[in-house]
């Protein structure tokens, strides 16, 4: 049994970014906090899927550099292994969501440089 709180976790970047709450063996669970203008780099996971459950605020999730999904409270969105995803808080309020990576796969994140407005990764320029 693991019991944790999403309030004031140890965020990677001090007061924001991801914070793992529970790690392994079957899943990694954490919370992501993005202040206005912050983004999580474009990336994919080779072996695990990643599910997002929005707690508060609004953000955009870009899938494969071409489709944008609006994330709002109570939205649940799952990315499969190999799907590129980029999250950006382009609102004026803080954004928080729970993320679940399953199966637990430490070191499974592959960053692929990309930002909205640029050609989708893998497309000819």
Image: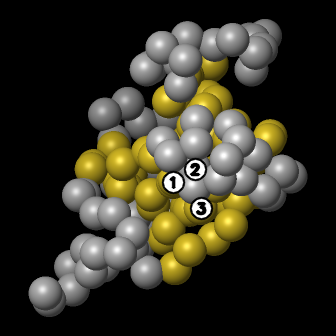
Instruction: Tell me whether circle 3 and circle 1 mark residues in contact (CB < 8 Å).
Output: yes
Of all residues shown, which one is farthest toward the bottom? 124
* 63 over 39 or under it: above or below: below
Which residue is disc 3 drawn over?
A: 60
Q: Quadrant of the C terminus?
A: bottom left
For image coordinates 44% across by 19% down, the residue present is 12
Other-residue count near label 1 (Cα within 10 Å), few / some / many at <14 / 14–19 / ≥20? many
Vertical placement of residue 113 versus 110, above or below: below
Residues tagged 3 and 2 counted as in contact (Cβ below 8 A): no
Residue highlighted by disc 1: 87
| 6 relative to 35 in the view: left or right | right
Which callout, 2 or 1, points to the residue nearer the camera? 2
Q: In the figure, is residue 55 to the left or right of 89?
A: right
Give the Cα distance between marks 3 and 1: 6 Å
**Residue drawn at 71 percent across, 59 percent down:** 71
Q: Which residue, as the protein is rendered here, is positioned at the far left?
A: 125
Q: Position of residue 94 (x, y in %)?
A: 68, 37
Labels 2 & 1 near each other (Cβ < 8 A): yes
| Coloration mode | secondary structure
Which residue corresponds to mark 2? 89
x and y, in percent, of residue 62 in the image: 50, 67
């Amino acid at each position: 049994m693991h019991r944790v709180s999403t309030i004031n976790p140890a965020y990677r970047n001090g007061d924001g970014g991801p914070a793992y709450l529970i790690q392994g063996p079957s899943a990694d669970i954490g919370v992501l906090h993005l202040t206005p203008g912050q983004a999580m780099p474009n990336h994919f996971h080779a072996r695990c899927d990643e599910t997002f459950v929005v707690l508060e605020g609004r953000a955009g999730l870009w899938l494969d550099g071409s489709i944008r999904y609006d994330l709002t409270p109570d939205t649940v969105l799952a990315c499969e292994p190999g799907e590129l995803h980029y999250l950006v808080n382009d609102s004026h309020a803080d954004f928080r969501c729970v993320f679940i990576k399953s199966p637990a796969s430490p070191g499974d994140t592959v960053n692929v440089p990309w930002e909205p407005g640029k050609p989708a990764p893998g497309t000819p320029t």
